[in-house]
Image (tube, rainbow, N blue to C red):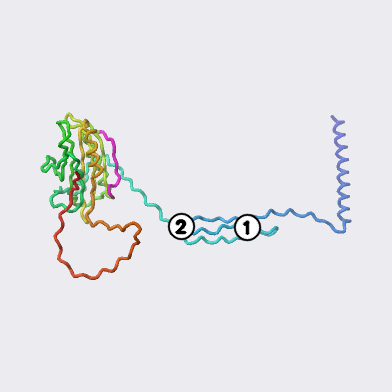
Amino acid sequence: MSENARRWRTLAGGIGALAAGVTGVLGVTSTASAQPVSPQPALPAPATVTQTVTVTPNAAAPALQAPVAAPTGAPAAAVAVPAAASAAPVVPPRPVTTIVPATSGTLAEFFAAKGVAMEPQSATDFRALNIVLPKPRGWEHIPDPNVPDAFAVLADRVGGNGLYSSNAQVKVYKLVGEFDPKEAISHGFVDSQKLPAWRSTDASMADFGGMPSALIEGTYRENTLTLNTSRRHVIATAGADRYLVSLAVTTSVDQVVAAADATDAIVNGFKVGIPGPAPVMPLPGTPALPLPAAAPQAPSVPAAAPPPQLLGLQG
């Protein structure tokens, strides 16, 4: 072990002397050189400046530019980014209003709690709304139905099972008092859900012709019969007045298939609208022309109002 140590010291001493000699030679060579050559520093890689273009909807697209390389050995110069062309302000989408169905309280109970009076309307001389109720073939209007607050009632006089006739009932109430229509319509399912042995098959809180509405369909029991029904409630605003329009189309379950065409025609063709002149549509390809200023006219004597079109009865 001691012999190996002496050998490593001797070898280390020789290497040290040799390194010193080499250093001396290099020092002399550097001093004796007439034109010393200094080692060139490593040049930095060319800096690349990229332009970030912000894309704005409806804005004119700026001209694309290739990346600008700074001169070799020089600091990277700032590159001016052209301002984006003036763009139209971005309007956020209108949030979708979601109505959460109430779990208790019928529409009548809601209005009573708010102090809102429900005044039943008669089809005679009613002009506040246009209501379309299709009348399928074989169905007849019942002039004196056994339905409380009935506005109009249709019944199938051809089909049926001898115990129950398929029918459609419309009720209209004028709502006198202050309330939130969206809050009110959230109670549109409850009256149906309180029917005996009720089972829902479909439901929707989507607007109906731009009006708050609740549609629910399902089955329930009445005495010994199982009935299938589709019920829609609509809150319509006409001027300063508001109305609740309700449609119920009901048939016995054993007549659902036989009466399907008629009941679908009523449910899908039922309409509630605000009276007013129909807009005049220009012919396709006709350019719109500015309307001339109306000349002043002498006041005219008001004519008698035309008879109301309450129900569109379609054969």
Q: Range of the magenta residues?
A: 199-209
Residue 206 belongs to the span the image colors magenta: yes
> What whole-number distance in Å separates the C-alpha atoms at marks 1 and 2?
28 Å
- On the rendered image, what quadrant is the N terminus found in? top right
User: Which residue does the numbered mark 1 point to in the structure image?
Assistant: 68
- Residue positioned 16% across, 42% down in the render: 153
Q: Taking 159 as reference, is 286 left or right? A: right
* Quadrant of the image occupied by residue 81: bottom right
The location of residue 95, given as percent across then percent down, is: 37, 50
Mark 2 is surrounded, within 10 Å at the Cα level, by few (under 14), some (14 to 19) or many (20 or more) other residues, namely few
- Residue 100 is covered by the magenta coloring: no
Q: Nearer the viewer, residue 1 or 312?
A: 312
Residue at figure coordinates x 25%, y 56% from the top left: 278
**Residue density around tag 1, few if under 14, some if 14–19, many if 20 or more, within 10 Å:** some
Q: Amino acid at mark 2?
A: Asn
Q: Amino acid at mark 1?
A: Val
**In this orientation, does residue 286 appear?**
yes
Q: Residue under circle 2? A: 58
Q: Nearer the viewer, residue 258 or 62?
A: 258
Could you tell me residue 99's position as x and y percent?
31, 45
Residue 241 in the image, given as x and y percentages of width and height: 20, 54
Count of residue discs: 2
Q: Secondary structure at mark 2?
A: loop
